[in-house]
Amino acid sequence: MSQFQSLLHLLPFIRVMLIFLFQGTKTLTGLQETKKEKSLVKVKLTRGKSVHIKHSQTYSSHTPELRMMVFASLFAALTAAGAYIQIPMPFSPVPVTLQVFFVLLAGSILKSKWGSLSMIVYTLLGIAGLPVFAGGSSGIGVLLGPTGGYIVGFILAAYVIGKLSEKTENAAKSSLLINALNMSLGVLIIYACGISQLMLAAKIGPGAALTLGVIPFLPGEIIKTAIAAYIASTHEL
C-alpha cells in the first residue's frame, strides 16, 4: 500500500510537467504566428498604391530552432529530476526511477538531433558538478565509473529512438506498438552500454553484471516503456 501511495503522490507532478511540455508547444506556435502577422509592414507609395513587405523569414527560420532548444533543455532538466524520483516496487528490490522514462520520451518526441542533444546537455551538467546523476552524484568520475555506461547509453538510445521515429513517421506507420518497439531497442542500448562498462570497471563477468545491473530493473523498465510509448503515440510537437 505504501508503494501505491508513493506512486499516487508522484502522478500530479508528472502530469503538471507533461501539461507544461505539450501546452508550451501551442504557446510558442501562437507567438510565432503573432510575430508573422506583425511583420507585415504596409508601405504607401506616392501614386496611392501600397505593397506589403514581409519580414517573416527570420522568425520562420529561427523560431522552430528556439522552440526545440527549449524542449531539449526541458528534457535535460526532467532527466535530472528523474534521478531523484524513486518509486518502490513490491515485486522488485530495486526502486524505479524516471531517468530512462524521460530518455525514451526525448528520443521519440524530440527525434534524433534534439533528443540526443538534450541527453548531452544532461551529461555535461553532471560533469560540470551539478548533482544530476543517480543518487545526486556528479563529476567526470561517475562517467568513468561502473555506472557511467548507462549515461552514455542515454545519449545513444535517444538518438536511435529518434532516428527510428523519424523513419516511421515518414512512412506514416507511427503507432503505439511501433513506438514501444523503438523504445524497447533504446532500453536494450542503455543496458548494453551499462553492463559493458560495469564489467570493465567492476571486473565482473557477464552473469554477475546481468544480475546486478539489468535483471532487477526489468519490471520497472517494462512499465516505463509502455507508458512512454502511449504518451509518444498520443502527443507530438
Image (spheres, rainbow, N blue to C red):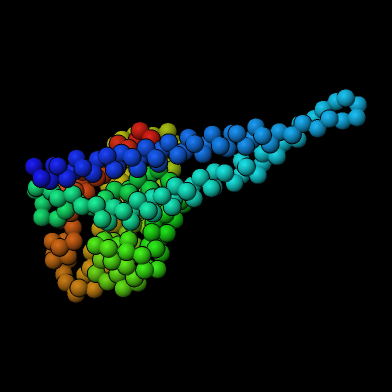
Position of 57 compared to 100: left or right? right
Position of 88 compared to 56: left or right? left
Position of 84 compared to 172: left or right? left
Q: Quadrant of the C terminus?
A: top left
Q: Residue at x 72, y 36 (%)?
A: 54
The tally of labels here is 0
Q: Quadrant of the N terminus?
A: top left
Q: Quadrant of residue 125?
A: bottom left
Residue 140 lies, in percent from the top left, at 35, 72
Which residue extends farthest right?
Answer: 47
Q: Quadrant of residue 33?
A: top right
Q: Is residue 183 positioned above or below 211 on the image?
A: above
Q: Residue at x 21, y 70 (%)?
A: 199
Q: Is residue 164 visible?
A: no
Q: Is residue 187 positioned above or below 151 on the image?
A: above
Which residue extends farthest top?
Answer: 48
Q: Residue at x 15, y 63 (%)?
A: 212
Q: Is residue 233 visible?
A: yes
Q: Quadrant of residue 142?
A: bottom left
Residue 107 lies, in percent from the top left, at 38, 48
Residue 229 lies, in percent from the top left, at 30, 40
Nearest the viewer among 206 and 132 is: 132
Residue 117 lies, in percent from the top left, at 44, 56
Nearest the viewer among 205 and 88 is: 88
